[in-house]
Amino acid sequence: MAERETWATRVGFILAAIGSAVGLGNIWRFPFQTSANGGAAFLVVYLLAVLLIGIPVLLAEFVIGRRANTSAIGAFRKLGRPGWWFVGAVGVIAAFWTLSYYSVIGGWVIRYIGGSITGGALAAPESYFGAISVGLPSVGTHAIFMLITIGIVALGIEDGIELATKVMVPAVVVMLVGLAAFAATLPGASEGYAFFLNPNLDTIIANAGTVLPAAFGQAFFSLSVGFSVMITYASYLGKNDSLPVDGVTIGISNTIIGVLAGLVVLPLLFAQGVEPGSGGPGAVFVAIPTALAELPGGGLVGQAVGVVFFGVILIAALSSAISLLEVVVAYLVDNYGFSRLPTAAGIGAAIFLLGIPSAWETAWLDWFDGIGVTLLLPITVLFVVLFVGWILGQDAIDELTDGSGIGSLAPIWLWGIRTFILAVVVIVVAINLWDLLAT
Ligand code: PHE
Ligand code: NA
């Protein structure tokens, strides 16, 4: 059998992981989750969730992946009691499931780049979105997005994912900084910042039952944990990298880019007097073009900003989509020795088919997102935490500290995983299950 692939460089791995983390979650989901859950109040809980729970869980997935040196399902088998393979399987299913609708939204983004160039998306935002987000047009752009994703994954780890994300992640950062600087010049931008940056603790307390699970769901989704993605990416890692340093770098970069996206979206909306609205898949696609159309300087400024804005989203979405497809492909390549290209194409086609209902009708997309983020995701996280905390135990500490000099913090991390983090994740799962069963 051919030797297993690895990342060419440590930076390559970090950028690929940041590329996975930064995506529609930061630019599309985060600003609207924030505005639907009390603005800055949500931001505070989200930041705590990332720091206290998200990053430690990210490290847990890194530990599993690098220690096993094989993709998710095999990793649990190799490290644990054989019965634990199902945790990886749920993660792989979650990745398959999520990509099916993620790609639909990615397709809309492609469409909106075109719509910004022609001006059609800005002229009548509501009816434009209504026309392109359902039925055959939406299925068509979904297909295009999947084809690009398949193409990159088919090229492999080093020549595909690593090379692509090395270009994509810096491009996203540069373009977002430019857009944020532009948004800052708009009159009225300060209202957007105020909404984003002034926490109101009463809001959190009054709405704890919805704000907490929403913030945790967003934190996990955003860090790409619970989908076996980070397990898979870490499995291509060498023993010399410092997992804690890499994990903290990835978690903090993802958060900074998320906040940066908020600093673009919210001032833009507030400056133009457009309400952020209550969220939902259409929000960014209707509100942003509405705001763009009203920019000073005539339609061309709005169109140009629109191309850059949707360009950033497309790049960010693609670098996440390839990580979701890679999870499934890696499993088949590792376990059955299939070759990459036909595997990526076949799995990509199956994911395309599963996404057709979401492309056809946005109610389906909401349903797929709901099941993925509130059910599959927290349940996988729960089992990852149990596995690393209570099955790997000391081995997890050894793996975490291998290649790094921060050994003394590792026992605190493991202790957190075993107790506090486990408890929080159990509560999140319980609330979500309760909500799901009650509706
Ligand atoms: N983290 C990505 C985002 O924020 C979504 C994602 C989740 C990607 C899980 C891969 C795995 O858009
Ligand atoms: Na993200």
Image (cartoon, rainbow, N blue to C red):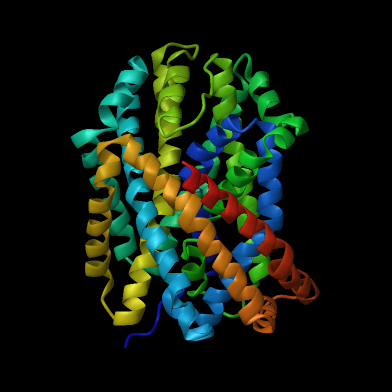
Tell which of 15 and 415 is nearer to you: 415
Horizontal side of residue 110 vs 177, given as left or right:
left
Number of marks present in the image shown:
0
| Residue at (39, 17) in percent of width and height | 300
Q: Position of residue 64 (x, y in %)?
A: 55, 75
| Residue at (43, 50) in percent of width and height | 371
Q: Position of residue 48 (x, y in %)?
A: 71, 49
Residue 321 visible in image? yes
Residue 301 visible in image? no
Horizontal side of residue 412 vs 343, given as left or right:
right
| Residue at (53, 33) in percent of width and height | 32
Quarter of the rendering occupied by the N terminus: bottom left
Q: Position of residue 427 (x, y in %)?
A: 64, 55
Horizontal side of residue 307 vs 29, given as left or right:
left
* Identity of the residue furthest to the bottom in this view: 1
Residue 128 lies, with reference to residue 137, above or below; the image says above
Tell which of 145 and 223 is nearer to you: 223
Residue 236 lies, with reference to residue 145, above or below; the image says below
Q: Position of residue 352 (x, y in %)?
A: 25, 52
Residue 161 lies, with reference to residue 286, above or below; the image says below
* Identity of the residue furthest to the left in this view: 136
| Residue at (70, 75) in percent of width and height | 404
* Identity of the residue furthest to the front in this view: 438
